[in-house]
Every structure is written in C-alpha cells, then in structure tokens.
C-alpha cells in the first residue's frame, strides 16, 4: 500500500514548443498528430512526476481540436493530475497557442490522458494518493473518477475503482 500523498501542484507541468514548418500538414497548419504527441509527452511527464516512477500511456480520451494551430505560433501545454486510482492517473492536458508578436493566447486543445505507474519489473504499481487542497481539485477528482468508471465500462472492465 502506497501511503504517500502528493498535491496536484507538485506534479503540474508546463511544456513549450515553437511550431516550425516541419510540424505542418499539407494545409499549412500544424498536424494534429504533432499536437497529440506533445500532449502525451506533457501528460507522461506529469504522471511520472507524481508517481516518481516510469509511467506508460494506457488511454487517451476526449482529444478535442477547438482551433487550428499555425506555424510560427508558440504552443503552451499544461498538464495536471485530476484523478489517481490505485496504479492509474488521469492527467488533463490543456493546450494554448501564443502569438509571440501580439501576445494573443488561444485555447486550441484539451485532452485526458491516462497513465499507469510501473515498478522495476514493468508491472503496474501503486501511485501516491492525491492530496486535494481546493474545491476545484475536489470537483475535478470526482469528474475524473466518473470518466474512469465510464472508460473501464466501455472496455468491459468491471474492476472497482479507487475511492
Ligand atoms: C498499462 C499496462 C501495464 C496495464 O496492464 P494491465 O494488465 O491492464 O494492468 P491492470 O489491469 O492492473 O490495470 C492497471 C491500471 O490501468 C487501468 N486501465 C487499464 N486499462 C485501461 C483503459 N483502457 N483505460 C483506462 N484505464 C485503464 C486499470 O483500471 C488499472 O487502474 P487502477 O490500478 O488505478 O485501478 C498494459 O496495458 C500495457 O503495458 N500497455 C501498453 C502501454 C504502452 O505501451 N503505452 C504506449 C507507450 S508509453
């Protein structure tokens, strides 16, 4: 039993990446797969920081593209843990673009990425409990718990999720 507790703030992660021509698709905006990869990277760092263990992606859920991202913009990604089960962690990744010349910030993407902490043998291992410090964190935890319940139901997994 992992009795450690960690706050959301302790693992919160920021990742910045300038969008160059090599990131573009044939239409001239940034390829969705590039953004997805960066989301997974940001989420994976957040989960590993929380668990202080290697963390593998087990699911990516609800990846939405609200606005196109253009070459020449700075992509700012923020990852934070919403929910921790026994070995699994749901990380919400929020993506914004920044126009470096005007300072304009646009919310372009959001994703929920789920990771599993691994032990030295590569098996799932317990992650520290989440210490919730604000009402918003408590609300996000409950919402994450419900999303995880629905994911497992879709996968046909009836395993009880951690309260
Ligand atoms: C991640 C992995 C180790 C889990 O193995 P497993 O045999 O399913 O292990 P478990 O049944 O103990 O599940 C581990 C946790 O993942 C959760 N989980 C499993 N499948 C899931 C899914 N599709 N969606 C969300 N959570 C899932 C389980 O509920 C459990 O969470 P809990 O401990 O908090 O209750 C295994 O599926 C794997 O190695 N996948 C490949 C990972 C990978 O290569 N990722 C891409 C590169 S990083």
Image: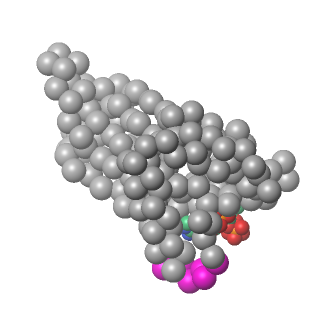
Task: Give the percent coordinates (x, y) of residue 124.
Answer: 74, 59
Which quadrant is home to the N terminus? Answer: bottom right
Q: Is residue 10 magenta?
A: no
Residue sitting at x 30%, y 26%:
74
Q: Is residue 155 magenta?
A: yes
Task: Give the percent coordinates (x, y) of residue 76.
Answer: 35, 31
Above or below, 9 against 5 in this view is: above
Residue sitting at x 58%, y 55%:
84
Instruction: Using the rendered image of the protein, determine whether residue 76 is visible from the camera's viewpoint.
Output: yes
Residue sitting at x 35%, y 25%:
18
Instruction: Using the rendered image of the protein, determine whether residue 33 is visible from the camera's viewpoint.
Output: no
Asked whether 99 or 162 is in front, the reply is: 162
Q: Please provide the residue range marked out in magenta.
A: 154-159
Above or below, 126 against 73 in this view is: below
Q: Is residue 53 left or right of residue 46?
A: right
Which quadrant is home to the C terminus? Answer: bottom right
Task: Give the percent coordinates (x, y) of residue 27.
Answer: 20, 44
Q: Quadrant of ligand 1?
A: bottom right
Q: In this view, does 40 lie to the left or right of 104?
A: right
Residue 104 sits in quarter:
top left
Asked whether 150 or 20 is in front, the reply is: 150
Name of the residue lying farthest toward the right: 121
Above or below, 59 against 111 in this view is: below
Residue sitting at x 21%, y 30%:
105
Magenta stretch mostly in which secondary structure?
A: loop
Q: Is residue 51 left or right of residue 97?
A: right
Task: Give the percent coordinates (x, y) of residue 29.
Answer: 23, 40
């Amino acid at each position: 039993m992992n009795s450690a507790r960690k706050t959301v703030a302790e693992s919160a992660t920021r990742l910045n990446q300038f969008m160059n021509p090599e990131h573009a698709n044939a239409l001239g905006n940034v390829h969705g797969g590039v953004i997805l990869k960066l989301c997974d990277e940001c989420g994976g760092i957040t989960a590993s920081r929380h668990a202080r263990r290697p963390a593998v992606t087990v699911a990516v859920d609800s990846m939405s593209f609200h606005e196109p991202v253009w070459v020449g913009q700075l992509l700012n990604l923020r990852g934070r843990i919403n929910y921790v089960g026994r070995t699994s962690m749901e990380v919400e990744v929020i993506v914004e673009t920044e126009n470096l010349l005007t300072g304009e910030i646009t919310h372009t993407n959001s994703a929920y990425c789920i990771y599993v902490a691994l032990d030295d043998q590569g098996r799932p291992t317990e992650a520290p409990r989440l210490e919730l410090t604000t009402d918003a964190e408590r609300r996000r935890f409950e919402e994450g718990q419900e999303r995880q319940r629905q994911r497992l139901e879709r996968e046909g997994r009836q395993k009880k999720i951690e309260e």
